[in-house]
Amino acid sequence: MWIVLGIAAIIFISAVSMYNSLIGKRNQVQNIFAGIDAVLKKRYDLVPNLVAAVKNYMQHEAGVLTGITGLRAKAVSGGLSDNEKVELDNKLTKAIGGIMVAVENYPDLKASENFLQLQRSLNEIEEQLSAARRAYNAAVTDYNNAVEMFPTNIFASGMNFKLKQVFEIAEQERQNVDVAGLFKS
Amino acid sequence: MKTREDLKSFFDVVLSPGLKELEKKRLKVLNSVILVEAGVLAVTLLVAGLVYNSGGGEPLLSVLFIGVLVMAGLFAVLTHSFRSPFKETVIRPLVRFFDESLSYTPDGCISCDLYTCSKLFLHHVDEYRGDDLVEGMIGKTRVKFSELHTQYKVETRDSKGRRQTQWHTIFKGLFFIADFNKNFSGRTVVLPDQAERCLGGFGKFLQSKNVSRDPLVSMDDPGFEKEFVVYGTDQIEARYILTSSLMSRVMNFRRKTGRNLYLSFIDSAIFIAIPYAKNLFEPNIFRTLLDFKPVEEYFNDLNTALSIVEELNLNTRIWSKV
């Protein structure tokens, strides 16, 4: 009798701890995604400053600046799905990268204190973003392992937990830098 | 960075004249040590012999014990007079050789508050000692380090009810603090990973259940993850501080020094503790000072601390902290 009760108690405690750990891991993924969102917002807040700092110099790149302002407006308007946020973020990364390359043609702008300060802030945000992505990937891997591994996978399928995608580095970022190409005008 | 050749010429030109004077003092102190210690040893053996003849046993052990104690005490007193001129003639010029702007306080040390604030060692401290404090700027980075020795005591009672006190070391070695080049508000602690090295996956499981520490942070560099365990209050911030580049720099530094490293990042500062078994920057009365080798050893120990800024790239200021 006691043995049966003991076994039942062990099964119950294990079930509760597995259930809680699954929920904990799912919440961790959501938490860190919220962290990414916060960093993205910081970057969107910086866009008007960046545009204001460079627009007097960059007459030829006016189209890029309008594009970047449009991206920001879309991002802050809200109501975007997670996938749309990620897509918008990738576009903005590319656009800001483009501006930073174009700045090389304007030595006065490059040396201005205002721009240097902006560049520092952008570097900081880029590094925070990369940290947030790494944290997200670690949390997703942890969550996916729990969803796929025995015995937590039994609970996961019962609770309808699905595998989540990790952040992937965009194809162009993964390619080796074409140094020769950089110097072609 | 200063090279061995720079040090050699510094030794020949700047240090040597002072060392010759100091060597005379050392020989004088050594002679008095030998004389006094020999005298105490002779008296101890004489008394021990008398006690032995009258029965031995516990009184004999007490006599020998007191003899050793007196010898150790006298050794400390006699050599103490040599310590201060040694530090002024050897260590202070060596510190200035690295950088003129660095200040050196032979009897100063990192404060107990900073040691506690680092969260590197959580055990309560009963005895806090330290010396050889070096402070100043290396490039754009403010640094501060000293030797530290922290201990806790355990009191037990033997079968006869006598109280015995045992001292255990918590940390002994170099304790280094510098301004970190990024702003952050949380707490990230990086410790040598003994549990995972010994117990593998089970070790990691135990670490994740460590209630005395903040939540475990799994890093994405397998080499780093194998050698270190990371605890932090913020998963994102821990990775913001520990970028791939900083992780590989920490591993390189660990390989170069061949020592365990304890690191923490708190209040925009970096704390590093490097354990040493020996007493750092202390004179050895039995070894000549005219050789280059001992000076080179002091230089290497100083270099371990002062090279941290360069090794971990702390002078890079591309973020908003300037």
Image (spheres, grey):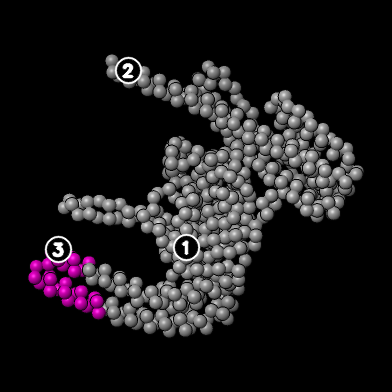
What crowding class fits label 1: few (fewer than 14 Cα within 10 Å), some (14-19), or many (20 or more)? some
In the image, what residue type sits under mark 1?
Cys
Left or right: residue B204 compared with residue A118: left
Task: Indicate the position of residue A8 as horizontal and vertical percent values.
Answer: 36, 18
Mark 3 lies on residue: B58
In the picture shown, does residue B46 fall above or below A51?
A: below
Identify the secondary structure beneath mark 2. helix
Q: Nearer the viewer, mark 3 or mark 1?
A: 1
Residue B109 circle label:
1
Give the chain of mark 2.
Answer: A
In the image, what residue type sits under mark 3?
Glu
Q: Residue at x 85, y 36 (%)?
A: A66
Q: Nearer the viewer, residue B164 or A160?
A: B164
**Residue B61 sits inside the magenta stretch:** yes
Left or right: residue B314 compared with residue B188: right
Task: Indicate the position of residue B194 as horizontal and vertical percent values.
Answer: 44, 46
Res. B12 image quadrant: bottom right
Res. B60 image quadrant: bottom left
In the image, what residue type sits under mark 2?
Leu
Mark 2 lies on residue: A5
Give the chain of mark 1.
Answer: B
Q: Are marks 1 and 2 on the same chain?
A: no
Residue B131 circle label:
none
Marks 3 and 1, how far apart at CA: 42 Å
Q: Residue at x 77, y 39 (%)?
A: A47
Looking at the rendering, in which quadrant would you find the N terminus of chain A?
A: top left
Q: Are marks 3 and 1 on the same chain?
A: yes
In this picture, which residue range is highlighted in magenta?
B39-65
The count of marks equals 3
